[in-house]
Image (cartoon, rainbow, N blue to C red):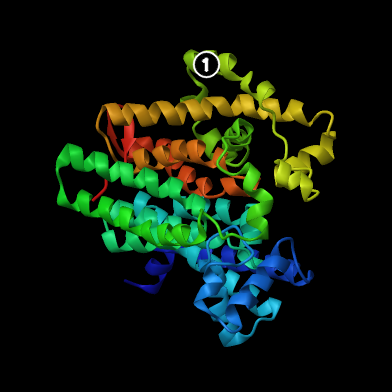
Amino acid sequence: MSLNTSLHSNFWLFAFLFSLSLILSGTWYFASQYSYWGDEVRFVETIKYFGQDFQIKKLIQYNEMSAPLPFLLYAGWGKIVGFELSNLRVFSLIIAVITYISFFWFVSRLFHNQKTAYFCTMFIVVHPYMLGFSVFVFTDMLPIFASVMALCATKYSKPMLILLAGITGLLSRQYFVFFLFALGLTFFFRFLSKKSRKDAYMAIAIFISTLPLGIFAYLWGGLSPPTHLNNLYLDEAFRFHPEYLSLYILQLFVYLLPFVLLNAIKIYGRITVWLITIATCWFYFLFPIVPSPAAREASFHTVGFFHRIVRFLVGSSLEHVIFFTMFTISIPIAVFIITDTFQRFRLKCYDLIFALHLSVLCYFLIMPFSYLLWEKYFMPLVPILSISLMAFNKQSKTAVENNIPIISLR
């Protein structure tokens, strides 16, 4: 293959690497202007706590609500290069680059199209939260990388990879269980339908991946360490908060707008969808979006980036008008995901899209039990739904059965 042919065939790969370098360089320069950003102060303290005079008992008691793996990895990095903030941020950048390149590779293989992979990946890269995850010392990027590993493992039926992804995800953020639960159900349904050992091995590997967190939960006496933060948020844990659903449904439109527009006719083109929307939009008035009690006690009066923009533009008195409008527009997207999931279940079509959409439903069932309401907790769904919605947009180029796109699992 000549050099010109190679450059032409990999144009979008080179464009992606150039764009990624440019954006992350600019974001790094912006981050370097700040000594600490948000929770970095507390996270760096926890990293130093693990990195200096490490003892096993520190895994049982440390002042965080999330699982310890990211802090341990940052601590290991700090032992090598030092615990200065800039050095720790380099590790964030490394995890981000690996995550983005892995996602680009997966999407390009999935759709056999580097151009599609470019736009899907860059959409994720330029999201304000992802930019923050990429350069600040936060713990959110590692579980997103775990979700990319899980997607690869699911598509290509790799039990050891799904085991590694599950352990990594759960020991980074406990809420990663929503994704593993959906993938586990997918392979369980496939085993019942096809009686394939490969599907059984995948389901077993997913179950085993939950055991390390189970051991920690036993030692902690709960799903997080028994510390000051745990006591502070305990009243809000394990209680279903329906108002959380209002935000997460709203984000289907706000955080996935380009992919929603690509599929606007499929999502909004049926009269029954609008009848359901009219019948259910009142839900927002019963459960409007407000910061969780724990957030208000900590002097947070918004739930994230979009909320702050809306409040800046229209003020707190009119923000619920915007929220209700966005919530109403988002209901057809939720209906689309729900109906597609049940259609695939009825047809016993347990493919990758079924797993992705089932994970969204599991997310909506599990995440309202959280103690905090933050927009950034929606971010694991962005790469998941960008893939499934792109598959519908490329339906004519994807295997189609019963008028739905199919992404088969090996």
Query: Which residue is drawn at the image coordinates 20% and 43% (left, top)?
Result: 191
Q: Tell me the quarter of the picture where residue 375 sits.
A: top right
Query: Does 25 appear above or below 410?
Result: below
Tell me the SS state at disc 1.
helix
Instruction: Give the labeled residue for mark 1.
Output: 276
Q: Residues within 10 Å of mark 1 (few under 14, many from 20)?
A: few
Q: Is residue 109 visible?
A: yes
Q: Measured from the top left, where is residue 214 in percent x and y?
A: 41, 57
Query: Which residue is drawn at the image coordinates 31% and 52% (left, top)?
Result: 155
Name the one closer to the observer, 273 or 10: 273
Q: Is residue 169 visible?
A: no
Q: Image quadrant for the N terminus? A: bottom left
Q: What residue type is labelled 1?
A: Ile
Q: Measured from the top left, where is residue 249 in percent x and y?
A: 58, 33
Query: Which residue is drawn at the image coordinates 71% and 46% (left, top)?
Result: 294
- In screen coordinates, is 86 left or right of 53? right
Query: Does 172 appear above or below 91?
Result: above
Name the one closer to the observer, 128 or 186: 186
Q: Measured from the top left, where is residue 23 in percent x and y?
A: 64, 63
- In screen coordinates, is 203 left or right of 277? left
- Picture mark count: 1
Q: Measured from the top left, where is residue 67 in percent x and y?
A: 53, 61
Q: Tell me the quarter of the picture where residue 302 sits.
A: top right
